[in-house]
Image (cartoon, rainbow, N blue to C red):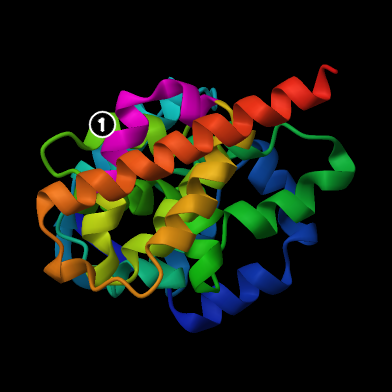
Amino acid sequence: MKQLYFVGQQTADFLTDHIEEQLDRYVGGDFLDLEEKGDWRIPLSIRADLDALAQLDPSGTPEAEVANSRTVGNAFSHLTPSLARENRIWIRLSHVEALEYSRHRWLAVRPEHLARNVRLHFFAPTWNACRDDHAISRLWWNWRIATLLMPEEPEAALAVILERADIRLNFIERTRAAARRPLARAMLRALIDNPKVRQSERAFREFMKAINFNAAGQTFEALRPDQFARLIDSCLDKAESTAAEATETAHT
């Protein structure tokens, strides 16, 4: 375990404002000369397994995303959700300790798209950017969401959550409110057990519509497990039948 650092605001502003001038560093160089003399080493009272970042797989496959999320989640297990929204922590990591992974994962693009991708994946100035876009922070949040929903099987949860972007978005939104997590857990278990629903965009959309309609006004904390099960089963039936009808109509 090593000391975790973040950059100062002056460094964060400089990097944000000079992306185009630093593209050679992002593509094939590094920032170590700048790191040695600027405010790049502000210590946090947290230690992390920074060596684990060398294990990250930049291929972008679903399997790699699950493994990378687990690696980052475990490596930064002492990071709190409030600290995990701090842009300057993630800037430090994507420019120093995780630069190699970040460039190979996100900068294999046409030259005219380089600056855009650097801005999107090497900085996390907003909650959405931190959760969805930054090369490393998005992996931490993936693992956080999975462990909130299924602490006993976070990897199984991640495999479903990361299967498609629309699935991930739905579960991210539902984990923000603690009162909605029991329903989200039941939904996730249903999707694990019913691959036809999660693998069909139409069926998943119908499942979510049924959930939103049938769960409206429910006090989730008061529901018993059998009530959750009945609610989910009825939504699954509705999703499967509606998707099947739409498919039949499209073929006639």
User: Residue type at mark 1?
Assistant: Glu
Left or right: residue 17 versus residue 111 is: left
Which residue appears at 51% of the width and 30% of the height? 240
| Residue 129 percent coordinates (x, y) | 55, 63
User: In the picture provided, is 199 more to the left or to the right than 74?
Assistant: right
Residue occupying the point 37% across, 63% down: 215
Q: Is residue 53 magenta?
A: no
Front residue of 150/219: it is: 219
Residue 34 location (% of width, % of height): 53, 62
Residue projecting furthest to the right: 112
Residue 190 among those drawn in magenta: yes
Tell me which secondary structure the magenta stretch mostly adopts.
helix
Residue 13 vs residue 74, the one in the foreground: 74
Q: Residue at x 79, y 59 (%)?
A: 20
Of all residues, the one furthest to the bottom in this rendering is 10
Measuring 77% from the left and 53% from the top, which residue is drawn there? Answer: 115
Q: What range is drawn magenta here?
A: 186-199
Image check: 138 left or right of 227?
right
Q: Which residue in the protein does label 1 denote?
A: 155
In front here: 50 or 246? 246
Residue 147 showing in the rendered view: yes
Q: Is residue 71 visible?
A: no
Q: Is residue 131 above or below residue 163?
A: below
Q: Residues within 10 Å of mark 1 (few under 14, many from 20)?
A: some
Residue 174 falls left or right of residue 247: left
Q: How many marks?
A: 1
What is the x, y in percent for residue 91? 48, 62
For mark 1, give the secondary structure: helix
